Image (cartoon, rainbow, N blue to C red):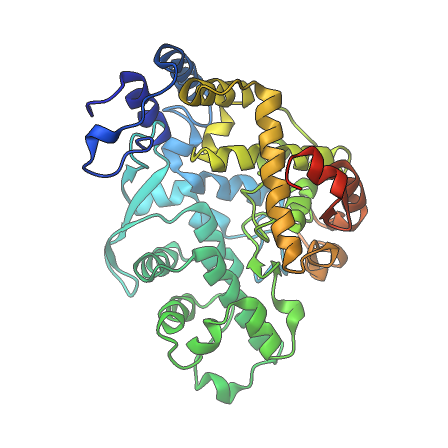
Amino acid sequence: MFESDPAVSLLSQFLGLELGIAAGNRKKRQKSANPEMLAEKVAESMSLIRENPVTGPKGGLHVYGTAVLVNIVNAHGAYSSRNFQQSYFPEADEQSGEKLAESYLTGTTGCWGCPIVCGRKSFVPDGPFSVKYTEGPEYETIFALGSNCGVKELDAVIKANHFCNEFGIDTISMGGTIACAMELVEKGKIPEEKLLGFNLRFGDPGAMVECVWRAAYKAGFGADLALGSRKLAEKYQAPEYAINVKGMELPAYDPRPIQGIGLEYATSNRGGDHVYGYTIPSELLGIPEKRDPYSTEGKPEWTIFMQDLGSVINSSVICLFTSFALGLPQYAGMLQAITGMELDPEKLLKIGERITNLERHMNNRYGFNRVQDALPKRLTAEPTPAGPSRGQVSHVPEMIDKYYELRGWIDGVPTEEKLKELGIA
């Protein structure tokens, strides 16, 4: 163990970092304001994490990694495929966390000192997609490079994920862009001569893998893929096929049968992002309490709460997955012990609200407003065609005014009164 305040060392095991420590500079380590209180709060938090059915040693995140969600989300009819044309993938079993563990897993990994250890180590022993060693793939990656491209082969997803890791490419955006390109080809928007014989079709694992390195090197059609889905679709006069919010490709939860996450995508300051305000635990898993995913009732309030909580967690540099087991009292207690600030859950949530509004205020200065707080038309106008959630659409247009009212915003812009209340203006 490092030579530092024992309470800070204990906390660093939990958080996965050494607070305020530069590598190799042990003499400048930050001391906690209240080591005894910190040790008590960390012990409480660690106990909750270990006992939780999601984060504990027998929980889904540790046993199967984030890919444990594949079958859960697919069973609800929210596992999108073919560029969000569908919300259910019949071959999901073949790319699930269970399948990964059975056929390709070599071990587990996690952030430094993490008690959850949700990371995977995998390999593909032979075949065209062989990989000796790689980390992942995560749930989002399996969706983006797998079902969203109509690809069921998990070995191909592992190979493409390995390329993304090596090239430093975000897998959600890469998969969303490939899926967009596949639909553009499917709908005849990209001329065959542009592809030079490249078989860019849904369900082709080789084409999907090839897209990654082509985009990285801007080789051939890869130069178009490197634009990202929005600019790619605009180039071929079909912007409706770019499934994004504020230029960010959407992640692995179809918002049509999960109303809260749809509102989160639309209003997130970062664009189409699920972790800015992660409503999935309550809407699909019943944590901390079950909320009907099809219903819009109470979703503006819950989305705001989760976004402000997310701002606190992200700014504290704590893993979002701890929120399956912990709540505001635990975060407030540990942060008070570290900083010496007088914090309680209400004060901490107000800090989160201030962060969210400050980010929004900055976005507004660059011209963002209500226009950008919208989902692609496909998700609000085209019902899910098949599967358990057949017939569902996202009701973001019906929820957003209430969201703005509760936020103290007008058309996506915080009022002067709200900015003054939060000490921003």
Residue at 37 percent of width and 79 percent of height: 219
Residue 141, given in percent of the width and then of the height, sits at 44, 52
What is the quadrant of the N terminus in the image? Answer: top left
Asked whether 403 or 280 is in front, the reply is 403
Residue at 71 percent of width and 49 percent of height: 390
Residue at 43 percent of width and 33 percent of height: 318
What is the quadrant of the C terminus in the image? Answer: top right
Horizontal side of 237 relative to 64 (left or right) equals right
Question: Where is residue 408, by image quadrant?
Answer: top right
Horizontal side of 127 relative to 329 (left or right) equals left
Residue 255 appearing in the image: no
Could you tell me how many numbered marks the image carries? 0
Residue 147, given in percent of the width and then of the height, sits at 51, 56
Question: Where is residue 290, by image quadrant?
Answer: top right
Give the residue furthest to the front.
425
Residue 296, given in percent of the width and then of the height, sits at 76, 38
Residue 342, given in percent of the width and then of the height, sits at 52, 17
Question: Where is residue 282, by image quadrant?
Answer: top right
Residue at 55 percent of width and 86 percent of height: 191
The answer to whether 423 is drawn above or below residue 412 in the figure is above
Asked whether 305 or 192 is in front, the reply is 305
The answer to whether 402 is drawn above or below residue 337 in the figure is below
Residue 360 appearing in the image: yes
Give the residue furthest to the bottom.
193
Horizontal side of 340 relative to 229 (left or right) equals left
The answer to whether 276 is drawn above or below residue 26 in the figure is below
The answer to whether 78 is drawn above or below residue 161 in the figure is above
